Image (cartoon, rainbow, N blue to C red):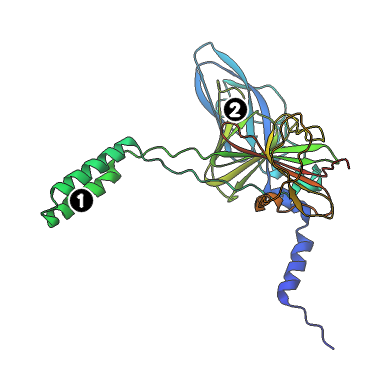
Amino acid sequence: MKCRIPISRLLCWLALCLFPAEALALVQDPVGTLGARVEGALGSFRAAAGWETTEVNVQLGSGESAQLRVPLLARRQSMELSMGELADAEDRVTWMEPKVTWPAPWGSLPYSLQGRSLSPLENSSPSISGLHWAWLGMSLLLVAALRRRPYRALLLGSALAGSLFLLPSAAPAQAPQVTLFEGDAPSGRWLEVRGAQDRLSIEGVQPGWLRRLPSNAEGRLELERGSGSTWAACFEGARIYYMCETSRHPQPGIQGPGRRAMRRTWLRRPGEGWSAHGAWPVSQGFPEAIAGDPGPPGWLVAGLPQGVGVLLGELEPEAGGSAWVRLVGFELAP
């Protein structure tokens, strides 16, 4: 008896052998940091650690100086790269550390944190300025005045409509950011995942990981002196996610959700389905189950391990977008 195995199945097995789970770590690009001292008359400079460029805007006058931490994006194989000649203004930039500080390898995180699904993002869309509305209103009045002469009205309307493209376009509205706190209860480790379309502003220059979709999108990092510790990852046409370990996460427990209230919560006990529990105010016990809730968003439950307790929640919104919590291993006392 002959055993026939489809070619497609053989290819899948071969792919699993050649590309183990650890290869998924290559999807995340490490973001390192390096302390710098800048002196003299200098508007800006660029720095790189083997890959995308970081543009640093300092705007220093003659005799002025500043100290700052510069984020650097590199490929995984560049993580051992030492300081070297990283800047294009070497005579006025002094690196204060011998090597770039990189994050821990992605594979060192608990496995449950490595395979979580990413949040969907809204696209930024251009807004219509008042000038465009005024031009449109004037065009309608002029065309209406020629309603008894349809050919002239058609010619004038076409000309006015085409002239709209000559007006200065309005700046696109900034797409809202999405923040997701990813927790692993057994290890006590948390990730803060921020996402945005085209441009992602990130508070705090610290080692982390950056993912852009598509992965071949070209862009840069930006850092501006005077903006505190906020920098930005800019990749036009791409979804951008930045991940770093955090200690400022919510601390949900039986006595309350921790630092921020939750407007919606869902709980899945081991071996059971999802139950909705509504709002969870700060310093209050876990709310009772409620009926009639459609359940958590599909993207929030994708990729979660089975057989363990999971808490999902939507935090009360802050300026700049929505925030969510996803905690694996959460248990309530009976």
Q: Amino acid at mark 2?
A: Thr
Marks 1/2 in contact by CB < 8 Å: the verdict is no
The residue identified by callout 1 is 157
Residue 326 percent across, percent down from the top left: 73, 43
Quadrant, the C terminus: top right
Residue neighbourhood size for the residue with mark 1, other residues' Cα within 10 Å, grouped as few (<14), some (14–19), many (≥20) = some
- Give the structural element (helix, strand or loop) at label 1: helix
Residue 147 percent across, percent down from the top left: 14, 52
- For the point 68% across and 34% down, the residue is 32
The residue identified by callout 2 is 230
Residue at the extreme right: 334
- For the point 74% across and 64% down, the residue is 15
- Quarter where residue 149 is shown: bottom left
Q: Is residue 228 left or right of residue 247?
A: left
Does any portion of residue 80 appear in the rendered image?
no
Q: Between 238 and 99, which is closer to the camera in this rendering?
A: 238
